[in-house]
Amino acid sequence: MTLDTTKHAAQTPDAEQPWAELGLKQDEYARIREILGRRPTGAELAMYSVMWSEHCSYKSSKVHLRQLGEKAPENDALLVGIGENAGVVDIGQGYAVTFKVESHNHPSYIEPYQGAATGVGGIVRDILAMGARPVAVMDPLRFGAADHPDTKRVLPGVVAGIGGYGNCLGLPNIGGEVVFDPCYQGNPLVNALCVGVMKHEDIHLAKASGTGNKVILYGARTGGDGIGGVSVLASETFDDSKPTKRPAVQVGDPFQEKLLIECTLEIFREDLVDGIQDLGGAGLSCATSELASAGSGGMRVELDTVPLRDATLSPEEILMSESQERMCAIVEPGKVDRFLEICEKWDVIATVIGEVTDGERLEIFWHGEQIVDVPPRTVAHEGPVYERPFARPVWQDALQADDAAKLPRPATGEELRAQVLRVISSPNQASKSWVTDQYDRFVQGNTVLAQPEDSGMVRVDEETGLGVAVATDGNGRYAKLDPYTGAQLALAESYRNVAASGAKPLAISDCLNFGSPEDPAVMWQFAEATRGLADGCQILGTPVTGGNVSLYNQTGEVAIHPTPVVAVLGVIDDVNRRTPIAFAEEGQLLYLLGDTAEELGGSAWSQVIHDHLGGMPPAVDLERERLLAEILISASRDGMVDAAHDLSDGGLIQALAESCMRGGKGARIVVPDGLDPFVLLFSESAGRAVVSVPRSEEVRFNDMCGARGLPAVRIGVVDGDAIDVQGQFSLPLAELREAYEATIPGLLA
Amino acid sequence: MARVVVDVMLKPEILDPQGQAVQRALPRLGFEGIADVRQGKRFELEVEGPVDDAALARIHEIAGTFLANTVIEDFSVKVEVGDGADSTAVKAES
Amino acid sequence: MARVVVDVMLKPEILDPQGQAVQRALPRLGFEGIADVRQGKRFELEVEGPVDDAALARIHEIAGTFLANTVIEDFSVKVEVGDGADSTAVKAES
Amino acid sequence: MTARVGVITFPGTLDDRDTQRAVRTAGLEAVPLWHRDKDLKQVDAVILPGGFSYGDYLRAGAISRFSPVMESVIEQAKAGMPVLGICNGFQVLTETHLLPGAMLRNNHLHFICRDQKLRVENAETAWTRAYEQGQEINIPLKNIDGRYVADERVLDELEAEGRVVFRYQEMNPNGSLRDIAGISNAAGNVVGLMPHPEHAVEPLIGTGRTDGLGFFTSILKRLVSA
Ligand SMILES: Nc1ncnc2c1ncn2[C@@H]1O[C@H](COP(=O)(O)OP(=O)(O)O)[C@@H](O)[C@H]1O
Ligand SMILES: [Mg+2]
């Protein structure tokens, strides 16, 4: 086969090209020809097709995502916003934090271990590329029904993969989610988050500038794994009727990544790079075009210098390969030797593959012949944009009308007790320690809070105690009932979790997991959720720093519940002041903060007891959330509460149970006047938390809540070794614990 | 009781970090001349009853659906006769 | 280039939970009649130059000092000829 | 002059910086050592920290064992220098045969991370003098290859000579024979264990206990009195 050079392409305008097989639409192909003024070469076609895929170009979601930037609240803490590998937030004392959540859903269904492992690897490199030392990971997960046989294949593999990779990198896992719902059958969601810390001056950006600067590819050799993975795996629906595609799944090498991290940090310390980019989806196509597009000049790359694992790879394949554990750096000529020396020290292969030119084109050569000559922006940043039609689904009204308030409720204290046990031991509400015990939460020696606390918290500065807290949340059931509210509830819950730990929420990242954008109903869900998130962030003053969109999570006609996952990052001046969830001190007073209304739509109770999903999700009042957060943070700073736990799915009883079991102490609860005990225990009204107040602080705490206008009602006292709801039931902690802890091991054994 | 051996190896195009680590270590230990190392798994199954075509077909199915994930791995099934020597090599599948 | 295969298995007296987990899962997947499963490692070494006695002796040494930990594992070395069929089985050591 | 404790970094070592911090917390000087250097920089003791050196590919500790620095460690260990292997470091010490037996995949096949209760069975070794004989301590455990095995003869010998230094209490987290969590060589200067004392030296971090500090103060005692 003759090499398809740019010259050859110009001479053979009529050559047939497999644009459709590569996932391009007719008009997209025509646009490429128009941009280039000729037909693309094979290599150019490969680059455009992969960079213009849904996964890389966000072509269906872009028009909606814009709001996240446009409505972003003014926030001095934001140092780098949406658009870079990850956003960067100022946390004071000269430190900056970067964090981001991403999805690796489809690959994790096909090869759970490797899919999940490489998901962690990818997000860690994003954080590293910003100039930061990665300090923690989190993993929001969704699986099919807990008792479905395939869940037994997918879940253990995913968990082992996340642990296998993250543990080997030395990153503490400080939190996440495990949610089961039949809607995720065949479409598990594997989202991964990484947090990194740096000094302000260490921030690095992905851009190639400075004529004559060298382009260095370092890390693993390039192989044939994952070729086309990005477009095939991430943007097409699985369809059982067609012969199975054989997508090449990437295999992760966490050891290589660990070396890459240490090597890169040492390179940063010596200030040896001008620009840097990790290689993720779309491999070199993405890294070279994005670096060149963001920079000031052009770029010239000699593709045959790329170190290969498989000598038979074609130039197109090398450009598209998604081999893991690779990075690309722009380095001044005078610093190249030192750069290579550091790589050698860490046994990392590094190769100069090109340089920054004073032109405006990205040119790629293969054995001296030009095979790519493109304006890089057209590849990286000016991909197609779709205004996909969207429409409120016809079934939405009926779903919302199917009110959970009409479901039969427990009639006696005994029945209530039985339902409490059933809810708390249900797979979604039960202990997740079978999962979290497989993750190292201690490594790096800075973990202040980890699962099962409300947020994960790590110390940033040993001297001052400065720290950050992160929580992730997302409730697909709420979002299914009302995507706008559902997205805001995810935001509110995550925000509340961070505040409950005593940290001040600063910024968010999100992963938007939805079905096919080609379905107007799904597109409506997406539009609504995004609008809800943007509006919510505006009110809470927490800008979106970056995130990820995962579409096509559906099997045939059936999409997953719309599942926006929101991660909130907060800062705490002194981690000594953090608030744990454990009720540990006998005699302390329990206060319920916020208003409890009768809100059962989408609740854990309605799911577990009635297998029901209908009605409206809990109402959101973000101003109230903000007030609650302020109170929780002040209370932590001034030592007015010893424990706090936010209320979310499962309601008050879930929070009480978790805090009691964590502290090994019971609670005596008195139902406040005018409240129905069932509603008190199971309603999922937002904007609430339960706190444990030392008696000596009661007056001060009450005064603060009163002065600021936050409802705070005393509901009981920490006492004994049972949860005793006066006049209703008593539930010994031992019995509770056994039910809570047995469920997940029982299902997976 | 007969022994059937199932070998599972990563497909050639798939990265094998373990094999690579071993190969890179060899020269440091003073062993030169090994151009490549791949590391895989070996399962020894003790089969009750005769290892006839039906049994082999079943083991093939076990191998292809459970012992190996054919998205990334190839496997081969062999019946071991006597002590150590393999026979009836059944071709690798993908 | 010749291929030499080194198989490493846990000694029989050492508990092999991986093999056991596989064996326990089989009936659940509908496969009966497998009395025991042991899981080990298989290394495929691509050897530059001829695989003569000297080369084999060297590979034996690699296997016994590095690929296997003989405190817990046995190994065997085989030269692979042609495609797939093994020969020249060299006896397992401990 | 305070005692100098070397902390080795192999490629893939994870807990080296934490171990250095623990050494400093105990009032000792931490000296980073690099796997490629034979030079031990005149340290008084050496710690092989936890992690996944060389990814734990092949077997945990198998590749690191051949690092240049290990030649010096083996030599010095035999000459009596205190050497502590934590988790991956313990695995390296068994692979080098400075300590007998071997580490295998946990019997439940999962990585496990938990607060683990141990009993100090021998408070005479270089690394356990700050503890009482029979004292119970609670420190984090985190590994996937933590199952200690050795043949019966070796186990009996270890027991008879008081070389089982730590035993798991309440639950055996990985199937280790005779609940062994850590052992020493015959001279008592080389100790290896799976749990992580370096993650239990500050009240706020990790388990919230400081039960692990004694390892590091033990060595201080020994070096100062020596
Ligand atoms: N996959 C996971 N990885 C790590 N931590 C998890 C995971 N799933 C749940 N957790 C942790 O378990 C605890 C309980 O989870 P969850 O009930 O979802 O918390 P919340 O309702 O407060 O958001 C939290 O600390 C959470 O971070
Ligand atoms: Mg919470």
Image (cartoon, coloured by chain):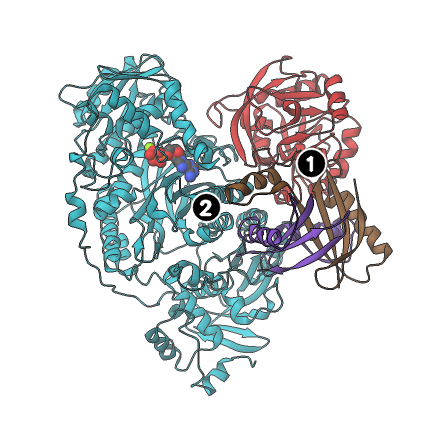
Chain colours: A cyan, B purple, C brown, D red
Q: Quadrant of residue A70?
A: bottom left
In this picture, residue A372 sits left or right of residue D27: left
| Quadrant in which the N terminus of chain D is drawn | top right
Rendering quarter of residue C3: bottom right
Q: In the drawing, does residue A155 fall left or right of residue B69?
A: left
Where does the image place residue D18, in percent across and percent down from the top left? 56, 33
Mark 2, secondary structure of its residue: helix
Given the image, on which type of amino acid does mark 2 rest?
Val
Q: Is residue A448 above or below residue A21?
A: above
Please, which residue is most extreme toward the left here?
A674
Identify residue for label 2. A154
Residue located 51% across and 45% down the image: C30
| Place of residue A667 in the rendered image (x, y in percent of width and height, measured from the top left) | 31, 16
Q: Residue at x 69, y 21 (%)?
A: D164
Of A613 and A487, the residue lying toward us: A613
Looking at the picture, does residue B89 appear above or below residue A156?
below
Give percent across and percent down for residue A303.
Answer: 56, 69
All told, the count of numbered labels is 2
Q: Residues within 10 Å of mark 1 (few under 14, many from 20)?
A: many
Q: Which residue is mark 1?
A: D92
Q: Are marks 1 and 2 in contact (CB under 8 Å)?
A: no
* Quarter holding ligand 1: top left
Q: Is residue B77 left or right of residue C89?
A: left
Residue A524 lies, in percent from the top left, at 22, 56
Residue drawn at the location 31% of the way across and 42% of the way down:
A474
Q: Chain of mark 2?
A: A
Q: Which mark is residue A551?
A: none
Tell me which chain the residue with mark 1 is part of: D
Tell me if residue D7 can be seen: no
For the residues tagged 1 and 2, is the chain the same? no
The Cα–Cα distance between marks 1 and 2, rounded to whole angstroms, is 33 Å
